[in-house]
Amino acid sequence: MKKIVGLALILILLQLSGTRTRAALSNPTACPTNFTCSITATGTRPLTGSATDGHAISIIGVISFDASSNVSGFFAINTNGTVSSANLAGATCTSGTGDGLGSIDFTPQTGRPLVFDFVTYVTSSGGTGLLVADATPVTTHGADVLVGKCLASPSQS
């Protein structure tokens, strides 16, 4: 259910951002190369009857991909008012295949499971953006629902 909600929100964000057709990018689920963007994402925990129900989560930071799609950068993560930071050095990016979304796994760097599904898109100004949705594997019946955008700076577009 979480992936369906995330995918629906990605589709809504694509429509609202004035993106062009899928043909505008050669492969919108391929890991970016030589790309740096500023990320903002927000979400909440679902209501499941536990003490952490409905808590807000937000992320702000920078993600960089080198020529080989190696991931680096940093996040500030605010979970219900508690702020933590994460160095993203060594995170892994896996390109999507067929109709599958790309995936960025930050788990080893953050110390807790954290995986984003993504698609890239062409912005209305001709730059590139990255839409993300939380895809962290869940072993309990409560999971964060999180979506966001990662936009390249004008000098990178």
Image (spheres, rainbow, N blue to C red):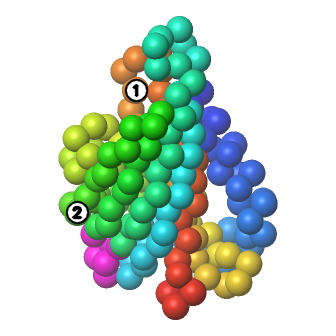
Residue sitting nearer the eye, 27 or 39: 39
Amino acid type, callout 2: Ala
Circle 1 is placed at which residue position? 138
Identify the amino acid type marked 1: Val
**Residue 147, above or below 15:** above
Q: Is residue 103 magenta?
A: no
Q: Count every numbered label the image shows and give the total.
A: 2
- Graded by Cα atoms within 10 Å as few (under 14), some (14 to 19) or many (20 or more), the crowding at tag 1 reads few
SS class, disc 1: loop
Q: Give the range drawn in magenta.
A: 65-71
Quarter assignment of residue 17: bottom right
Q: Residue at coordinates 47% horizontally, 72% vertically from top-left?
A: 37
User: Which residue is label 2 attached to?
Assistant: 89
Residue 117 in sight from this viewpoint: no
Nearer to the camera, 56 or 144: 56
The residue at 74%/78% (across/down) is 124
Q: What element carries label 2?
A: loop
Q: Give the quadrant of the C terminus.
A: bottom right
Residue 145 at x, y = what percent? 55, 35
Query: In the picture, which quadrant includes the N terminus?
Result: top right
Position of residue 57 measured from the top left corner of the image (x, y, whole percent) = 50, 39
Q: Residue at x 64, y 36 (%)?
A: 5
- Which residue: 62% across, 35% down? 4
